[in-house]
Amino acid sequence: MNDRFLKACRREPVDATPVWFMRQAGRYMAEYRAIRARHTLLEICRQPDLATQVTLQPVEKLEIDAAILFSDLLLPLAPMGIPFDFVKGEGPVIERPIRSVDDIQRLRSFEPREDLQHVLDTIRLVRRALEGNVPLIGFAGAPFTLASYAIEGGPSSHYGKTKALMYGEPEAWRQLCETFASVVSDFLTAQVEAGVQVVQVFDSWVGALNPDDYREFALPYTRTIVQSVANLGVPTILFGTGTATLLDTMREAGSDVIGADWRIPLDDAWERIGHDRAIQGNLDPTLLLGPVGRMLEEVDDVLFRAAGRPGHIFNLGHGILPETPVEHVQALAHYVHTRQ
Ligand code: CP3
């Protein structure tokens, strides 16, 4: 079993820096596009045999040290009473975004073992297929990021509606985030029971908040989620983008690993987080578009800043872009393993 990744999560020494990529399964890969030509994204997520195939594609194609469950952040919204779809060219579209206190009171808790059973079945199938080769990462969204989709109705650049509710109806915001925290904790517990070996909590858009607001409006709920997974003995990763000023506060959520994006140098990020935690990151995904020489120079810079300290997991600062040449991703994963 290749356990470099699990070891790095616990800040134990490793033979080579572990590497995996956010969005390592996806449109940049021909094998994914072939399946996607015949199925919608939601069909892939909801059919365990398809989700399993797609989860394994990057493991077969790249020298990576972890698999990540193929699923989507938004899946828990539907059984909570927030139906959505993915629309070509637009991304996720929520049918009836949350706009009022009434909408929040109508939200339902649900039983992940029934309503998202297909995700748990995928986990079991992937674990069997991996045969212990590399560990499997499960994931879910943090309350701020889930709330931003539920309230905006789709992607947003300034989160105006989300923040209007947060500042204007703080009690309703608290109720919404507590509901998300409880649903997500339960879903992640079910994922761990089904076999995921590490959990990543995506708070992708939380960099929209300043540190005081992060502490008041996001941290308490994210902490609930992280602690419920940590209680099961499974390592946790907390990830967001645009978080340079939030990293020291994010630390208080208690995760073993904190993800950083490319807007802050890795060594600065690690100082802010504290060297008693592991760090994941932080190459700019646009560097994978080329030229390869420039990409590898920046890889050296990231590794130089990690300084051989135990507890660095190499990743991008955000997901692989769809137009990325697959050979560049292959070269990158291989290169990280050769640089010690
Ligand atoms: O390989 C992996 O990383 C696992 C798969 C994965 C997907 N979504 C599949 C997917 C993961 C970890 C996610 C999480 C996710 N989903 C996040 C958090 C990660 C991040 O990017 O910060 C978010 C914000 C979402 C919501 C979401 N899903 C958006 C905004 C979009 C549209 C953007 C886009 O790239 O088109 C999706 C669609 C989605 N989820 C795709 C994939 C592979 C796009 C592929 C397709 O349409 O075929």
Image: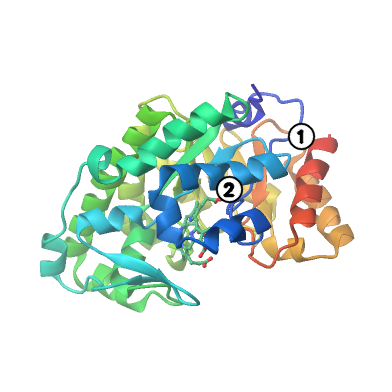
Q: Position of residue 185 (x, y in %)?
A: 30, 40
SS type, badge 2? helix
**Which callout, 2 or 1, points to the residue nearer the camera?**
1
Q: Quadrant of the C terminus?
A: top right
Q: Position of residue 7 (x, y in %)?
A: 62, 26
Closer to the camera in the image, 56 or 176: 56
For mark 1, does the 10 Å Cα neighbourhood hold few (<14), some (14 to 19), or many (20 or more) residues? some
Q: Amino acid at mark 1?
A: Gly
Q: Does any portion of residue 310 appear in the rendered image?
A: yes
Q: Is residue 232 above or below residue 215?
A: above
N-term mark: 2 or 1:
2
Residue wearing tag 2 = 272
Q: Position of residue 227 (x, y in %)?
A: 35, 35
Name the quadrant containing residue 123: top left
Q: CA distance from mark 2 to mark 1?
A: 18 Å
SS type, badge 1? loop
Q: Position of residue 213 (x, y in %)?
A: 36, 62
Q: Quadrant of the N terminus?
A: top right
Residue 85: which disc?
A: none
Q: Does any portion of residue 268 appear in the rendered image?
A: no
Residue wearing tag 1 = 308
